């Protein structure tokens, strides 16, 4: 696990499985934990290189609260509709773009967001975590 970058690039890339994470940007997120304000939406941009072929891809996002992963719904889970040109080819680099909406009914807590993109066999193309603080 690498240490987070300064500025808008604040995240912890994890072992990817069948891909290599090159860069992760959550915007705006100048410091950690990221201050996520209720009712706002944050952009997520991940550059990764696939080491496998896949017809499709699916994002799986969890909020980890006290060690327990809780599904975190996003508007578009289809990676092929989020900037990734499918079918995914081996040894090709892709830019994944999505939004992280923070609903007003979410509690004001600290947690860790885990975001992964899976191929059509359920293997991780990328996976990263970032500490966040949900605030009013």
Image: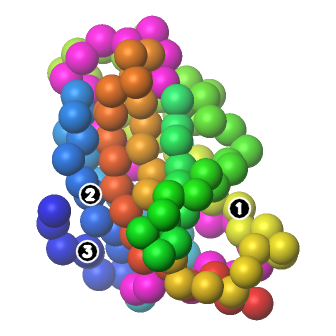
Q: Is residue 44 visible?
A: no
Name the residue rendered at 28%, 65% in the picture: 12
**In the rendered image, which quarter contains the C terminus?**
bottom right
Q: Percent x, y for residue 111?
A: 51, 76
Give, as a single range, the part of the protein colored magenta.
Answer: 32-57
Is residue 36 left or right of 128 when viewed as pictured?
A: right
Q: Secondary structure at mark 3?
A: loop
Answer few, some or many: residues within 10 Å of disc 2's Cα (few below 14, many 20 plus, some between 14 and 19). many
Residue 80, picture quadrant: top right
Asked if residue 6 is positioned above or below residue 122 in the image, the reply reads below
Residue located beneath label 1 in the image: 101
Residue located beneath label 2 in the image: 13
Residue 81, picture quadrant: top right
Q: Percent x, y for residue 76?
A: 68, 38
Residue located beneath label 3 in the image: 4
Is residue 1 left or right of 108 when viewed as pictured?
A: left
Answer few, some or many: residues within 10 Å of disc 1's Cα (few below 14, many 20 plus, some between 14 and 19). some
Name the residue rendered at 16%, 62% in the picture: 1
Q: Secondary structure at mark 2?
A: strand
Q: Secondary structure at mark 1?
A: strand
The CA span between labels 1 and 3 is 22 Å
Residue 50 part of the magenta-drawn span: yes
Name the residue rendered at 61%, 52% in the picture: 71
Cβ–Cβ under 8 Å for marks 2 and 3: no
The first of marks 2 and 3 along the sequence is 3
């Amino acid at each position: 696990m690498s240490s987070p970058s300064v500025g808008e690039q604040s995240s912890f890339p994890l072992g990817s499985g069948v891909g290599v994470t090159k860069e992760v940007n959550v915007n705006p997120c100048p410091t950690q934990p990221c201050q996520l304000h209720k009712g706002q939406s944050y952009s997520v941009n991940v550059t990764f290189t696939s080491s496998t072929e896949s017809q499709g891809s699916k994002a799986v996002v969890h909020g980890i609260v006290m060690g327990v992963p809780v599904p975190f719904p996003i508007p578009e889970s289809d990676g092929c509709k989020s900037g990734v040109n499918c079918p995914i080819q081996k040894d090709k680099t892709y830019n994944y773009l999505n939004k992280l909406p923070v609903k007003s009914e979410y509690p004001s807590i600290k947690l860790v967001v885990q975001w992964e993109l899976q191929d059509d066999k359920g293997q991780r193309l990328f996976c990263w975590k970032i500490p966040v603080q949900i605030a009013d």
